[in-house]
Amino acid sequence: PIDGKGPLTAAELRRVEFKAPGIIARQSVYEPMQTGLKAVDTLVPIGRGQRELIIRDRQTGKTAIAIDTILNQKQINTQGTSDSEKLYCVYVAIGQKRSTVAQLVKILSEAGALEYCIIVAATASDPAPLQFLAPYSGCAMGEYFRDNGMHALIIYDDLSKQSVAYRQMSLLLRRPPGREAFP
């Protein structure tokens, strides 16, 4: 574990790939999720259960928005009395430097955010299969919260590194990585 608090013990094992519930079984988005950023909350409000893509050029603050959103949940989680009102965060770091992940852990630890946050890290020095599987692992953790009546925020940073890992694996296996475009 990257937080230095000892080995993890699994209370439950889950499949990484699991069939998603059908569209009819899902509830519509009706409850807002506060990011703590007034511009985002006002102009582009995000609801619990909604997917949102943050796409911009390099070094424009995409990760900062995600970290600020995680840090803001502490304020909201202290107001919630039950686990079903809290928002648990899963941050999936794909292909990032170890120093960047360590810096993130330090920021979240100092803010007391690791109480409600899980960090899944497949760093740049990890093998391509781990980088490919990291988003699936993070999603399985988010599904655990969903299945137990809780809310989860999953942040994938950065999915383009997963596509690079997938491409590497496909080329090593001598299989086409995609049907039409770069995966």
Image (spheres, rainbow, N blue to C red):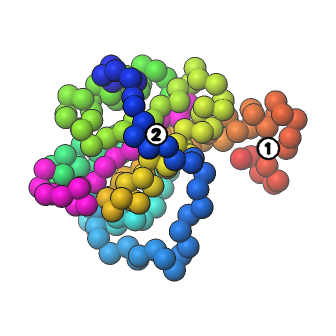
Q: Residue at x 19, y 35 (%)?
A: 112
Q: Nearer the viewer, residue 59 or 23?
A: 23
91 magenta-colored: yes
Q: Quadrant of the N terminus?
A: top left
Element type where label 2 sits in the image: strand
Can residue 7 be seen here? The reply is yes
Q: Residue at x 59, y 23 (%)?
A: 126
Q: Residue at x 84, y 34 (%)?
A: 173
Q: Which residues are magenta?
A: 78-95
Q: Amino acid at mark 2?
A: Val
Residue named by callout 1: 177
Judge the density around disc 1: few (<14), some (14-19), many (≥20) Cα neighbours within 10 Å. some
User: Picture coordinates of residue 52 (x, y %)?
Assistant: 45, 59
User: Picture coordinates of residue 41 (x, y %)?
Assistant: 27, 62
Residue named by callout 2: 92
Q: Is residue 169 above or below residue 33?
A: above
Q: Amino acid at mark 1?
A: Pro
Q: Nearer the viewer, residue 106 or 5?
A: 5
User: Picture coordinates of residue 36 (x, y %)?
Assistant: 23, 53
133 magenta-colored: no
Q: Earlier in the sequence, mark 1 or mark 2?
A: 2
Task: State the count of labels.
Answer: 2
Element type where label 1 sits in the image: loop
Q: Is residue 126 left or right of residue 119?
A: right
